[in-house]
Amino acid sequence: MGQLGKNYSSIAREANAVSGKELLELVYRTIRKIHMLVGGRILYLECENNPKVIQFYINNGFALIKDYETPNKLAVFVKKIEHIL
């Protein structure tokens, strides 16, 4: 289990912080290392049920599990690990 987040503060924007896509690539590097140790086939992702956030993950190859929400009102996505290897 892991967690990632993007900082949208004015300080982060002025510092030219990494993009969401770059942040995902950093996460994928870690997942690749973990995959080599323990295996696995599916990435499971929960995120804020926000149209911009949902579109970001769709644009990056995640599949939204439609008509499903966690008890905490989060949207759920999956992605095959083979698509990041």
Image (cartoon, rainbow, N blue to C red):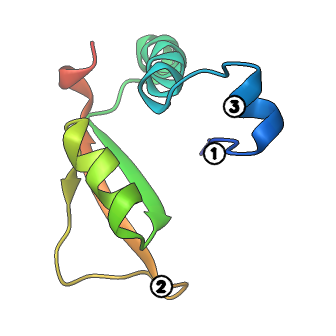
User: Which numbered disc flags the more N-terminal residue, 1 or 3?
Assistant: 1
Left or right: 60 in relation to 28: left
Q: Which residue corresponds to the image point at 37% horizontal and 59% vertical from the top-left? A: 52
Q: Residue 14: x percent and y percent?
A: 75, 25
Q: Amino acid at mark 3?
A: Arg
> Mark 2 or mark 3, which is nearer the start of the sequence?
3
User: Is 15 rendered above or below residue 76?
Assistant: above
Marking on residue 13: 3
x and y, in percent, of residue 84 in the image: 27, 19
Q: Which residue is mark 2?
A: 73
Instruction: Assess whether mark 2 and mark 3 are in contact (beta carbons under 8 angstroms).
Output: no
Q: Residue at x 22, y 48 (%)?
A: 58
Q: Secondary structure at mark 1?
A: loop
Residue 56 image position (x, y, % from top left): 33, 46
Identify the residue at horizontal 51%, vertical 19% (top origin): 34
Residue 12 in which image quadrant: top right
| Nearer to us in this view, 19 or 24 | 19
Measure the C-alpha gap from mark 3 to mark 2: 29 Å
Q: Under tag 2, what secondary structure?
A: loop
Labelled disc at residue 3: 1
Cα separation, mark 2 vs mark 1, equals: 17 Å
Q: Can you say whether 56 is above or below 69 in the image? A: above
Give the CA distance from mark 1 to mark 3: 21 Å
Q: Quadrant of the C terminus?
A: top left
